[in-house]
Amino acid sequence: MNTRTTGIIGDLAVEADGLVKTFGSTRAVDGVSLAVPRGCVYGVLGPNGAGKTTMIRILATLLRPDGGSARVLGHDVVREAAAVRRLISLTGQFASVDADLTAEENLVLLGRLLGHSRRQARQRACELLDAFGLAAAARQQASRLSGGMRRKLDLAASIIVAPDLLFLDEPTAGLDPRSRSALWETVRAIVADGTTVLLTTQYLDEADKLADRIAVIDHGRVIAAGTRGELKASTGSAGIRIRLLDPAKRDRARDLIASGQAITVHDEPDPAVIAARIPAKQRPAAAGELAAHVLTRLTSAGIGVSDFALGQPSLDEIFLALTGGQAGTPDTEQPQPAPAGTEAVR
Amino acid sequence: MTAAIPAVDRPAPAGPAAASLAFAWRSLLKIRHVPEQLGDVIGIPALFTLLFTYLFGGALAGSTHRYLQFLLPGTLTLAVVFVTVYSGVTLNADLATGAFDRFRSLPVWRPAPILGALIGDLGRYLLAGGLVIGLGLAMGYRPAGGAAGVVAATALVLLFASALSWAWITLGLVLRSPSAVMSIGFVILFPVTFMSNIFVDPATMPGWLRGVSGVNPVSHLVTATRTLTAGTATAPQVLWALTATAALTAVFAPLAVLLYQRK
C-alpha cells in the first residue's frame, strides 16, 4: 500500500512560528504562527492581499522567510527544503498545470519527475483521468479545458504520488457553484486517503464545508484560529441581511429589529442594507424565528423590503466581529458570493 | 466520481539526468502543440539567407551564386544564434506560470527545468540550422567539405548556441518580462552578428572595426563553420570556436543557476 510516513497522533503537519516576509515596504506576512495537526483539513481564511499565498509559498519552500521559522512534517522549510519537497504537493492559485500540454501529458510529465517509469506514469495518468472524470479530455490541451476541469486536473496532478501534505491555494476561485461542490467532493476523497490539506480561501462557506480548523488571516497576521465552532462563537452562528426599498427608513428599521431581541444589528456600507447576527449559543431554530420576527415588524410598520437573506455570517461580518474594523484590503474586487445555505426571500 | 482514487507506492524521485530529460520532453511537446512559436525559427533564417544572397550577392561577390558559397555558413550561424534568444524569452514567460511553481516544489534537482529546456531547445536550433542548409542547397550552395563537413559545422554551431543560451537564460532570470528579454537580446545580437565576418570579409573594414570583428566570438565560430564546410578546417580554427563556447558556458551557466536558485 502506501509508504507515507505515519506520525504519532497529535504531531503536527505544519508548525510555523512568527513567519515574516517583506516585499519592499510591504510586510506581506507579518509574524504568522500556525499549528496544523496531521490528518485534518486546515483552512486559512482571508481577503485578497492578506498574505495567504505568500505564506503557502514559504511553507512549500518556494520563498525564504525573512524572519521566523517553519517546520513541515518535522522538517525545517529552509534547511531541509529537499526533505519537505518529498512530502508535499502544491496546487497554486492559478492553474498549476502547463497550459500548452494535454491533460495526459501534464500527468505523465509529473509522474516521470516523481520517479515513475514511462509505463507506470502513463498508467497512473490514465487512472487519475478516469477517477476525476477527465478521460474524455485526456488529449486536449489544458488551455482548452473549462475552469472546473482545469482545477480537477490540477488536483489530479497533486496526487500522482499521494502527498503527506497538500497545499491548495484558493482551489475554487473563479469556479461556478457546481464545479465548486464537485471540487470539494474531490478534496474530501483525497483527505479520506490520509492526506493533510492546508487550503486557503476567501469564502467562509468553503472553509466551513471543508475545514476542521480555520485560521483567519488579515494584513499578514493571524487574527483568529480554532475549530469552526470556536470561530463561530466569536461571530454569531447565523445572520440576516435586509435590503430596504427606501434607504431613508433605515434608522427606523434598525430600531424596530433590535428592540427586545438578543441580537446585534449594524449598518452595512450600502445605505439600504442592514445586517443582524444571532449569538452562537442560541437554539438552531432561533434563526428562523428571528427572520419571522424581523419580517413581521417591518411589514406591519410599512417598511418595504427588496431583498432578504438568512444564512451564515459573511466573511465581512466575521472580519468585523474579529477586528471591529473594515474587512481586509480595499481591493477586495470580487463580489462576495451569497453566504452558503442562504434562503433568499424576494 | 472520485469514489476510488487508487493509491500507489511512492517511488524515489527522478535523478538529475532523468528529470532534465523529462523537461526536455516537455519542451519538444511544446514545439508540437504550439507550432506558431516556430515562426521565428523558420522566418529569420529563411529571410536572411534569401535577402542577403539575392539583394547583396551580386554587388559583394560578383554573382549571387559565388556569394552564396561564402554566405551560407555565415547565415547558418546567424540563424541559430538569433534563435537562442528565445531560450531566455521562454524561460522568463515560464517562470510566471503556476506550472513552474509546481515544478519548483517537486523533489527533483533544482536546475533540471532550465537544463531540460536547454536540451529541448537544441531541437529548435537543429530545425533552424537544417532549414538554412536545405534552403542553401536548393539555391545552389555546394559545400566542398561534403556531408561530413556540414554535419561537423552544424554540431559546432549547436554547441556554441547552447553555450550562448545560458547568457539569455541569465537575462531571462533578471528581467521582468519576456518582451524585455527579447528586445535587449536583439539589441545585443544585431551589432555582435553584423560586426563579424558573417556577411563580408573584414579585410575591407576600417581598422578599429576589423579589430572588433577579430575578437568577436561569432567571427571565430563562423571561420570554423566556413572552413569545416569547405573541408579546409585547421585545428586552431576549431579550437578558437570551442574556447569561445567554453568561456560563455563557464561564465553564464553558473551565474544562471545561481540566480535561479535564489529566485
Image (cartoon, coloured by chain):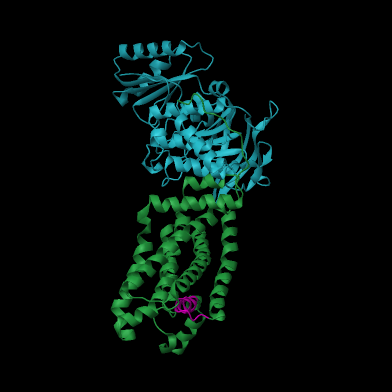
Q: Is residue A319 above or below residue B16?
A: above
**Foreground residue, A48 or A129?**
A129
Residue placed at 68% from the left, 47% from the top? Answer: A79
Q: Is residue B229 above or below residue B183?
A: below
For residue A222: magenta?
no
**Which quadrant, please, contains the N terminus of chain A?**
top right
Q: Colour of chain A?
A: cyan
Chain coloured green in the rendered structure: B
Q: Position of residue A306 (x, y in %)?
A: 30, 22
Tell me where the magenta segment starts and ends, as one range.
B221-233
For residue B223: magenta?
yes
Q: Residue furthest right?
A: A8
Residue placed at 38% from the left, 43% from the top? Answer: A143
Q: Position of residue A8 (x, y in %)?
A: 70, 27
Which secondary structure dominates the residues rendered in magenta?
A: helix
Q: Is residue B85 above or below residue A149?
A: below
**Foreground residue, A199 or A52?**
A199
**Foreground residue, A222 or B222?**
B222
Drawn side of residue B126 relative to residue A88, left or right: left
**Foreground residue, A227 or B23?**
B23
Q: Is residue A326 visible?
A: no
Q: In this figure, what is the number of numbered marks?
A: 0
Q: Quadrant of residue B90?
A: bottom left
